[in-house]
Image: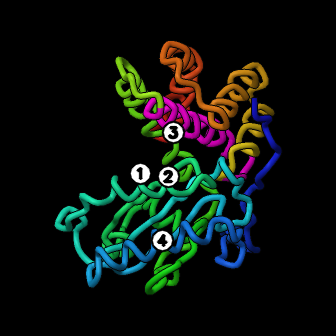
Amino acid sequence: MPSIKKIGRFCSTDDEGYIINDAHIEKVQPIFMEVIQEIKNTCCELLQDDLHSVYIRGSIPRGIGIKGIADIDVIILVRKDPELIDLSWRKKLEIKILQKFNCITGVELSFYSEKEVINSKSFSFISFMIQTHGVCIFGEDVTLSLPKYKVSQELAYEHLIQLGKQIGQARKELIHNKGVEDIADCCRWIMKIIIRAGLALTIEREGLYSRDLYPAYELFSKHFPEQEKNMRKALQYVIEPINDINEILLFLSTFGEWLIERAAAFLNTIDN
């Protein structure tokens, strides 16, 4: 069983409290460069004039991606509504990349309108991710056109408002699913959401934020020691996903429901 490694850190902030983006193309380890290059080249070839810019986010551009565990998370900005573009190749490319490169365990290509991201009047999580965790690998970098972000109640809200819906979606995807890889992917996806939601519950008290899972687990456990074992289990499920549907569903109906209740209580304080 792969051991839990104490990897990751909380976001640094400047003198005014704004999150400092510590991602940089030079921090990408050589083993991941070929994957990134292939994704970039394919996007350029298939999107052509519709492509505005491409960003990678997550552990890899921050230099802490682990071979065989890291995901490639790609944000692709296009010049018009993504629904007006033929993106039927997206899933095929994700599968092809996963099969070709064993240094990663997941690929996510997300497409957004460049104008919508830049002109958003309310909190945009994609804008937040590009500004605080992304690095541009192609095109015109939009970060100078985006707002700066602080660790805030608004950020906690974004992580908690959809939690019940996301856990419900995971349940729906798991029931009667016979695809071993599908089950494992769903397990990793929902456990990451759970861990980050746990961190969100501490944001008001601690003023700290991280996309990294170990610091999130550790800070949550400081405030909710009685749930430490459950959050550690969620972390273990990310590192080594299981394909036992009943075990995952049981975890979601116990710890998942507890977390949903805590999230609802927190959100209620904001609404009121």
> Which tag, 3 or 1, sits closer to the chain's start?
1
Relative to 99, does residue 36 appear above or below in the rendering? below
Identity of the residue drawn at 55% across and 15% down? 247
| Alpha-carbon span between mark 2 and mark 3 | 16 Å
**Marks 2,1: beta carbons within 8 A:** yes
Q: In the image, which is nearer the foreground, mark 2 or mark 3?
A: 2
Which mark identifies residue 115? none
Q: Secondary structure at mark 4?
A: helix
Q: Residues within 10 Å of mark 3 (few under 14, many from 20)?
A: some
Question: Residue at the left extreme?
Answer: 84
> Which tag, 1 or 4, sits closer to the chain's start?
4
Q: Position of residue 168 (x, y in %)?
A: 39, 26
Relative to 147, does residue 105 appear above or below in the rendering? above
Which mark identifies residue 189? 3
Magenta residues (range):
181-210
> Which tag, 4 or 2, sits closer to the chain's start?
4
Quadrant in which the N terminus is drawn = top right
Identity of the residue drawn at 66% across and 58% down? 59
Q: Quadrant of residue 162?
A: top left
* Disc 3 residue type (three-letter): Trp
Relative to 265, does residue 134 appear above or below in the rendering? below
Decide which of 18, 3 is in the foreground and name it: 3
Q: Return the residue at label 4.
A: 38
| Alpha-carbon span between mark 2 and mark 1 | 5 Å
Decide which of 256, 8 is in the foreground and name it: 8
**Does residue 42 appear in the picture of this structure?**
yes
Q: Secondary structure at mark 1?
A: helix
Q: Return the residue at label 2.
A: 98
Which mark identifies residue 95? 1
Q: Residues within 10 Å of mark 4 (few under 14, many from 20)?
A: few
> Which tag, 3 or 4, sits closer to the chain's start?
4
Q: Quadrant of residue 188?
A: top right
